[in-house]
Image (cartoon, grey):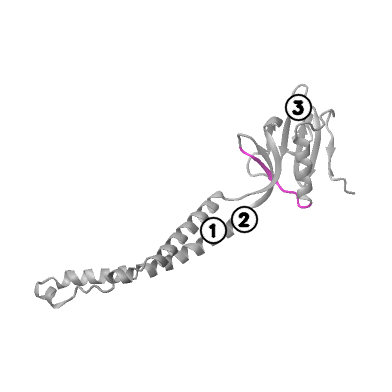
Amino acid sequence: MSGWRNRVDDLLYSGESVVESVDFDSVGIVITSHRVLTFDPESDGATFQQVDRPNVEGVSMGAQSDSGLLERGVRTLLVGVVLVGAGLVVDFGSLVGGVDLGGQSTQELGMGGIMGTLQRLLGLISQLDYLMRVFGALALFLGVVFLGVYWFTRDRTLVVEVAGGDNIHVPRPSENAGDYAERLEQLVAPGSPVEKSGTETAQNPLGES
């Protein structure tokens, strides 16, 4: 793929010219008069991606990770909040705690076994608010764990924001990421200079020595 990065001219359309090329680490981003081209030879997916400049809404800093972890973490936190809230608001012990189904009259009617089972069930229900608080706290803990794993395993990226399509993510520069994002934002904006022709490679677009 690095060979194609060095042969950008072969990828240009008729009448298309390179405005500027920005390289950092193993990533190359080429801004042309018509498109934004990205080269990421270490990507697990497509190593070359492109988007027409009118569809580029900007360049920003972002991140990529397992979206399932984020969704699962938020959902688990919501379940935990609901369970804890319900356990604090509803007192099941006051609702069924004073009921006694094991009296002498039930024994005489031969219903002692059934009433004993119902009495144990009522005892369990009386503890339901406590159980809801316990399981709610566990759900909150798991939700925090899921979100923590999501946060620490995400890959920090530069994002080419695409209108009406999937954004393009490339690994974020190890240094001066904000400066790179700002520079690329200026280059892809409407009205940026497009008079240059041929390929111009700016290995250090930030002007550092």
Q: CA–CA distance between discs 1 and 3?
A: 44 Å
**Is 194 on the left or on the right of 85, as rendered?**
right
Mark 2 in CB contact with mark 1 (< 8 angstroms): no
Label 1 belongs to which residue? 146
Label 2 belongs to which residue? 153
Tell me the kind of residue under disc 2.
Thr
Nearer to the camera, 198 or 4? 198
Residue 59 is at least partly visible in this image = yes
x and y percent of residue 79 in the render? 45, 58
Tell me the kind of residue under disc 1.
Phe
x and y percent of residue 207 in the render? 87, 45
Q: Main secondary structure of the magenta part?
A: loop
Task: Give the residues in magenta.
Answer: 166-175
Q: Residue at x 52, y 51 (%)?
A: 71
Quarter residue 28 falls in = top right
Q: Residue at x 10, y 72 (%)?
A: 110
Which tag, 1 or 3, sits closer to the chain's start? 3
